[in-house]
C-alpha cells in the first residue's frame, strides 16, 4: 500500500528544493556555454598557441570525473593558506558557488567539442557566398556561421544539457541542498529510500521533459528549410474549381 500522506509530504519538501537545482543548472549551463564558445573558437582558429591550451583544457575536463573535479575545488583548494587569504576565498568557501563552477568548467569542455563540430560542419559554399557579397568578420559569424553551427550542434548539445540536469545531483555531496540532497536528508530521517527516490526521480523526469521540449522547439524554429512546404498547387486548383 502506498503511503499517500508520506509521498505528498516528501514531494512537497523535494519541490521546495527545485529552485536550487534549477539555479545550479541555469548558472552552470550559461557559464559553460560561454566558456565552450571561447574554447571552440580557439580550436578552429588554426593558431597553435590558441589551439593547444584549448585542447589541453578539454582533455583534462573530459578525461576526469566531475565528482573529483568538484571535490578538488571545494575540499582541495581550501588546504592552501594562500587560497584562504585570497580575494577568491569568499567564493571558494561557498558550496553552491563551488558546485556551480565545477559544473560549468566540466560542461564547457564537452560543449566546446560539440560547438567545434557545429562550426566545422558549416558548408564552405555558404561562407564563400557570404564573402562574395562583402560579408566578413563579426557579420559573417553572426548571420551565417553561428546560426548554421548552432542548428547543427543543437541535437548533441541537448543531450549535454539533459546530462547537466542529472549532474546537479552531485552537488549534494558538497552539502548543497538541491533535490537529491534533500532526498538523502529525508531518507536519513525516515529510512524509506524507495518512496523518496521515486519522488526525486519523478521531479528529474519532469524537468528533463520540459527542457527537451524547449530545445526541440528551438531546433524547429532554426530549421524552417527542413519542414515540408505547403502544397500551393493543390490550393490553387481547389480555388480555381
Image: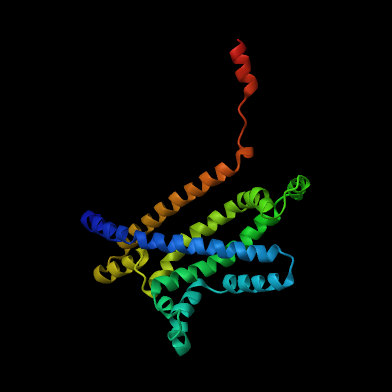
- The x and y percentages for residue 195 are 30, 60
Q: Residue furthest bottom?
A: 81
Q: Residue furthest left?
A: 5
Residue placed most toward the observer, 106 or 131 = 131
At x 50% / y 75%, what residue is drawn?
69
Q: Please identify the quarter of the rendering in which residue 115 is found.
A: bottom right
Q: Residue furthest front?
A: 134
- The x and y percentages for residue 77 are 47, 83
Picture layout, residue 75 above or below residue 172? below
- The x and y percentages for residue 81 are 45, 89
Relative horizontal placement of residue 84, taking residue 235 as reference (left or right): left
At x 40% / y 52%, what residue is drawn?
206
- The x and y percentages for residue 181 are 35, 68
Residue placed most toward the observer, 2 or 230 = 230
Q: Quadrant of the N terminus?
A: bottom left
Please name the colour scheme applied to the rendered image: rainbow
Picture layout, residue 91 above or below residue 125? below
Picture layout, residue 29 above or below residue 86? above
Q: Quadrant of the C terminus?
A: top right
Residue placed most toward the observer, 55 or 194 = 55
Residue placed most toward the observer, 39 or 238 = 39
Q: Count numbered badges in the picture.
A: 0
Picture layout, residue 37 above or below residue 66? above
Amino acid at each position: 500500500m502506498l503511503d499517500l500522506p508520506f509521498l505528498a509530504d516528501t514531494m512537497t519538501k523535494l519541490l521546495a528544493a527545485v529552485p536550487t537545482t534549477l539555479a545550479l543548472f541555469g548558472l552552470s549551463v550559461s557559464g559553460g556555454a560561454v566558456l565552450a564558445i571561447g574554447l571552440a573558437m580557439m580550436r578552429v582558429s588554426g593558431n597553435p598557441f590558441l589551439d593547444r591550451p584549448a585542447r589541453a583544457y578539454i582533455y583534462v575536463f573530459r578525461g576526469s570525473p566531475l565528482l573529483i573535479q568538484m571535490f578538488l575545488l571545494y575540499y582541495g583548494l581550501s588546504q592552501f593558506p594562500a587560497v584562504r587569504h585570497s580575494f577568491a576565498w569568499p567564493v571558494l568557501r561557498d558550496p553552491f558557488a563551488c558546485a556551480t563552477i565545477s559544473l560549468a568548467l566540466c560542461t564547457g569542455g564537452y560543449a566546446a567539442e560539440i560547438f567545434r563540430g557545429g562550426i566545422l560542419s558549416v558548408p564552405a559554399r555558404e561562407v564563400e557566398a557570404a564573402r562574395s557579397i562583402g560579408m566578413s568578420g563579426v557579420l559573417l559569424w553572426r548571420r551565417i556561421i553561428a546560426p548554421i553551427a548552432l542548428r547543427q550542434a543543437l541535437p548533441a548539445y541537448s543531450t549535454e544539457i539533459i546530462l547537466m540536469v542529472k549532474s546537479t545531483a552531485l552537488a549534494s555531496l558538497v552539502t548543497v541542498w538541491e533535490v537529491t540532497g534533500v532526498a538523502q536528508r529525508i531518507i536519513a530521517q525516515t529510512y524509506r529510500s524507495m518512496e523518496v527516490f521515486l519522488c526525486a526521480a519523478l521531479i528529474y523526469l519532469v524537468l528533463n521533459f520540459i527542457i527537451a521540449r524547449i530545445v526541440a522547439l528551438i531546433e524547429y524554429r532554426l530549421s524552417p528549410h527542413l519542414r515540408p512546404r505547403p502544397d500551393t498547387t493543390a490550393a490553387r486548383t481547389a480555388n480555381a474549381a
